[in-house]
Image (tube, rainbow, N blue to C red):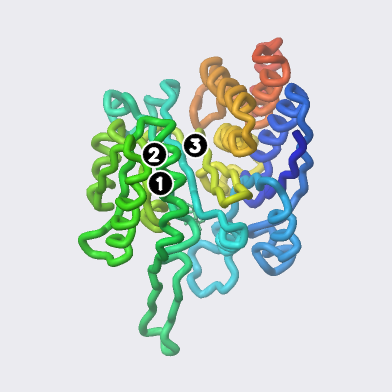
């Protein structure tokens, strides 16, 4: 199979983690005889520095004509705390999502027993935790009309949704539920918001096409409690943009490692794949960043291409690396491996048909370099 992939390394640890994902792409193309053509594009603080804008039109065009976009992370602290700035790295991401029509943000929350001890929850709560969040990504308050009074004394952000927008993501969420545990929870604030009431009405109407799926509803404040108290009770969570942003961050901490969580943002044809963590600027160039969430995002990309076996091979390689304790310092502070060597070993495992002539001595040496 031939595919063109736009690669956005971004800011902070972005380049380091994307480099490891590229090794995995190369290993997959070698093992399965695919051809992935990579085209590099700037976005984020690095693009602001180079071009004065967080993403250029040329960069957007390359992403649009690609089959998928692989993103590391964007963001820099120097933009974070100054609300008067007109140009910010995040605008690049929002523009990319909108222009590519990426309306479905998918964030699977899976647990791995190797990192359970880092979860803020008691281990017994983590039993059966395996759910996925479907967040609407290009509507709602993020993209509604914004106003600021001339004298700066008042501001507003409009939250609006059309039935078409609701239907597009809702169908995808039901399709996902059909191949999972057949349970869909709509998270909203229908006791207060008109948009939420429209979501409930539309989702209920569409649910008639998926009679096997059990549909229930949760107000977002209650959902925040349930995600902590009973995370094992969810299968597919469907929600609008802003609630999805918050609930997915909440959900991401319960597994014990945000460094293992990938995401996909899909439109009708294109897709953007990125780890859910940020650019972690403090770790830049230290070779300590965890590349696994980015590598798992490549697995989601493979699923998007219909290459399910390739996706499984990548996920198995990650499980193997965790089992072998080939992990960065966020997961193993006493015996950490560098970002680069973790990427090398995972790629090697894939390339050598799920085995590795694993040379502990070499790895020990590379650990030495790290320390
Ligand atoms: C996310 C991020 C973005 C969002 C930011 C960077 C604009 O938090 O992908 O969840 O709010 O959607
Ligand atoms: Mn977020």
Q: Secondary structure at mark 3?
A: loop
- Point 39% across, 72% down: residue: 158
Q: Does 51 sit above or below residue 274?
A: below
Q: Does 18 sit above or below residue 309?
A: below
The CB of the residue at mark 1 lies under 8 Å from ligand 2: yes
x%, y% of residue 161?
40, 65
- Point 58% across, 24% down: residue: 312
- Point 48% across, 67% down: residue: 143
The CB of the residue at mark 2 lies under 8 Å from ligand 2: no
- Alpha carbons under labels 3 and 2: distance apart: 10 Å
Whether the residues at callouts 3 and 2 have beta carbons within 8 Å, the answer is: no
Q: Does 290 sit above or below residue 70?
A: above
Whether the residues at callouts 3 and 1 have beta carbons within 8 Å, the answer is: no
Residue at mark 2 = 253
Q: In the visual, does 307 lie left or right of 168?
A: right
Residue at mark 3 = 261
Foreground pick, 240 / 344: 240
Foreground pick, 286 / 240: 240
Callout 3: 10 Å neighbours few (<14), some, many (20+)?
many
Image quadrant assignment for residue 32: top right
Whether the residues at callouts 1 and 2 have beta carbons within 8 Å, the answer is: yes
Q: Secondary structure at mark 1?
A: helix
x%, y% of residue 237?
36, 43
x%, y% of residue 229?
24, 36
Residue at mark 1 = 249
Foreground pick, 266 / 59: 266
Foreground pick, 310 / 347: 310
Residue 368 can be seen in this image: no
- Point 52% across, 38% down: residue: 262
Q: Which label belongs to residue 356?
A: none
Question: In what quadrant of the picture does the N terminus appear?
Answer: top right
Q: Residue furthest bottom?
A: 151
């Amino acid at each position: 199979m031939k595919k063109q992939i736009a690669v956005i390394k971004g800011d902070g640890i972005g380049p380091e983690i994307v480099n490891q994902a590229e090794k995995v792409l190369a290993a997959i193309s070698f093992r399965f005889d695919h051809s992935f053509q990579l085209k590099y594009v700037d976005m984020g603080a690095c693009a602001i520095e180079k071009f004065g804008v967080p993403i250029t039109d040329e960069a957007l065009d390359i992403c649009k004509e690609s089959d998928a976009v692989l993103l590391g992370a964007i963001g820099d602290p120097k933009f974070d705390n100054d609300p008067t700035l007109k140009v910010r790295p995040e605008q690049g991401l929002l523009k990319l999502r909108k222009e590519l029509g990426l309306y479905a943000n998918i964030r699977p929350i899976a647990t791995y027993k190797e990192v359970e001890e880092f979860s803020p929850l008691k281990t017994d709560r983590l039993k059966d935790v395996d759910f996925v969040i479907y967040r609407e990504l290009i509507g709602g308050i993020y993209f509604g009309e914004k106003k600021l009074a001339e004298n700066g004394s008042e501001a507003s952000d409009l939250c609006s949704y059309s039935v078409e927008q609701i239907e597009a993501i809702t169908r995808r969420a039901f399709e996902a539920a059909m191949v999972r545990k057949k349970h869909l929870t709509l998270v909203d604030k229908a006791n207060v918001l008109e948009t939420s009431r429209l979501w409930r009405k539309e989702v209920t109407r569409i649910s008639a096409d998926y009679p096997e799926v059990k549909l229930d509803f949760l107000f977002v404040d209650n959902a925040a409690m349930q995600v902590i108290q009973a995370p094992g009770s969810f299968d597919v969570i469907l929600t609008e943009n802003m609630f999805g942003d918050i609930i997915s961050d909440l959900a991401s901490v319960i597994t014990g490692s945000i460094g293992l969580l990938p995401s996909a943002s899909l439109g009708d044809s294109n897709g953007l794949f990125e780890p859910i963590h940020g650019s972690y600027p403090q770790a830049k160039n230290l070779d300590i960043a965890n590349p696994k969430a980015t590598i798992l995002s490549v697995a989601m990309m493979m699923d998007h291409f219909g290459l399910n076996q390739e996706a499984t091979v990548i996920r198995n390689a990650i499980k193997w690396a965790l089992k072998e304790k080939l992990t960065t310092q966020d997961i193993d502070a006493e015996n950490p491996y560098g970002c680069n060597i973790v990427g090398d070993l995972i790629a090697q495992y894939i390339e050598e048909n799920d085995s590795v002539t694993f040379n502990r001595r070499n790895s020990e040496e590379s650990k030495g370099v790290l320390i």
